[in-house]
Amino acid sequence: MSSKKILIVFLGMIGLGLSGFYLIQFGAYPVAIVGSSMISARSLETTALSAHRYYSQSLKAYGEERPGEILEDHGTILELRRAALDRLIEDAIIHRELKARLGETLESAVTKKLDGLTFGDNTEDAVSVLYGLTFAEFREMVLVPKAREEILAGRVFGEGVSDFEELLKKSRQGVKVIILAPDLAWDGEKVAIK
């Protein structure tokens, strides 16, 4: 092998190593695949941390002196991750179902629904304190998925489906879900702790 080829292989290996490092560092790798969409480690961790922050603030508000002891338990942290991933998977399924019904008009329907909301003067501060998120993050993580869910519920009701939860259950059973997180698994309907 010539020295030029060795140098190219060496630089290629360094490039792959750095790329892998940054993917892991920024949580850009998948923890779950729902149909053809991916849920990243970063999405899972952000969702779980915001839930952790919310419960911590709630416990403080109700007089719990040491909420950290309750929320730092390994089982509690694992349950928060399980619930967060389950919600992200449900959001992906709702998005998929709604996309099948609305096609290219999906985003405009969500924007229209959200544009109708009004917020108080302290909403951004409240979101920051309760969830540890910026309002833009809160909008993408909470409001947009909720708007999609409400739009889908309205659509399927208009199609004659009276039990939205049953539709979601069937959708959960019908979609291929692969969970890559080592401590969580898909049981065919929901995320379970291994």
Image: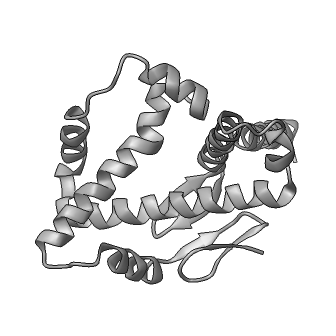
Q: Can residue 132 be seen in this view?
A: yes
Left or right: 37 with respect to 73? left
- Residue at position x 63%, y 50% in the image: 44
- Residue at position x 60%, y 72% in the image: 178
Relative to 77, residue 130 above or below: above
Q: Nearer the viewer, residue 75 or 106?
A: 75
Q: Is residue 5 visible?
A: no
- Residue at position x 20%, y 71% in the image: 156
Instruction: Choose top left, top right, bottom left or bottom right for residue 110.
Output: top left
- Residue at position x 44%, y 58% in the image: 91
Left or right: 146 with respect to 190? left
Residue lying farthest to the front in this orientation: 63
Relative to 82, residue 128 above or below: above
The number of numbered discs placed on residues in the rendered structure image is 0
Left or right: 32 with respect to 81? left
Q: Which of 18 and 138 is in front in this view?
A: 138
Left or right: 117 with respect to 190? left
Q: Nearer the viewer, residue 125 or 185?
A: 125
Relative to 185, residue 139 above or below: above
Relative to 183, residue 104 above or below: above
Residue lying farthest to the top in this orientation: 121
Instruction: Choose top left, top right, bottom left or bottom right for residue 159.
Output: bottom left
Q: Which of 39 and 159 is in front in this view?
A: 159
* Coloring scheme used: one colour
Where is residue 68? Give x, y as percent. Answer: 83, 40
Q: Can you say which quadrant of the picture contains the C terminus?
A: bottom right
Where is residue 123? Give x, y as percent. Answer: 43, 24
Where is residue 192? Give x, y as percent. Answer: 68, 74
